[in-house]
Image (cartoon, helix red, strand yellow):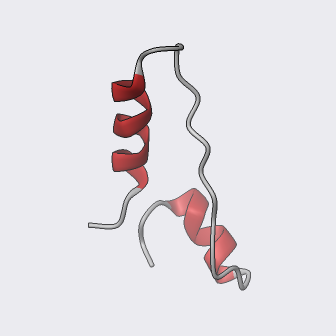
Amino acid sequence: MSYNPGLDEHFDAGATHVCIQPFHVPGDLAAAERTLEAFAPH
């Protein structure tokens, strides 16, 4: 899939879904959005 080498390991092992839970400072939702964007397929 080539989204991210660490994530690819899960897909290569047979995963069909991987959940990413971003952590951020309370109230800084932009940081969480940046985290998810970094791992999103392009």
Q: Is residue 4 left or right of residue 10?
A: left
In the displayed structure, would residue 40 be above or below residue 24? Answer: below
Q: Is residue 24 left or right of residue 10?
A: left
Question: Residue 28, located in which quarter of the rendered image?
Answer: top left
Tell me residue 1's x, y (percent): 45, 79
Seen from this angle, which residue lies furthest right?
A: 13
Seen from this angle, which residue lies furthest front?
A: 27
Closer-to-camera residue (27/6) = 27
Tell me residue 39's x, y (percent): 42, 53
Closer-to-camera residue (8/23) = 23
- The residue that appears at 61% across and 43% down in the rendered structure is 21
In the displayed structure, would residue 27 be above or below residue 7? Answer: above
In the displayed structure, would residue 16 be above or below residue 28? Answer: below
- The residue that appears at 42% across and 46% down in the rendered structure is 36
- The residue that appears at 56% across and 37% down in the rendered structure is 22
Tell me residue 13's x, y (percent): 73, 80
Seen from this angle, which residue lies furthest left?
A: 42
Count of labels in the image: 0
- The residue that appears at 37% across and 59% down in the rendered structure is 40
Q: Is residue 22 left or right of residue 14?
A: left
Quarter in which the C terminus is drawn: bottom left
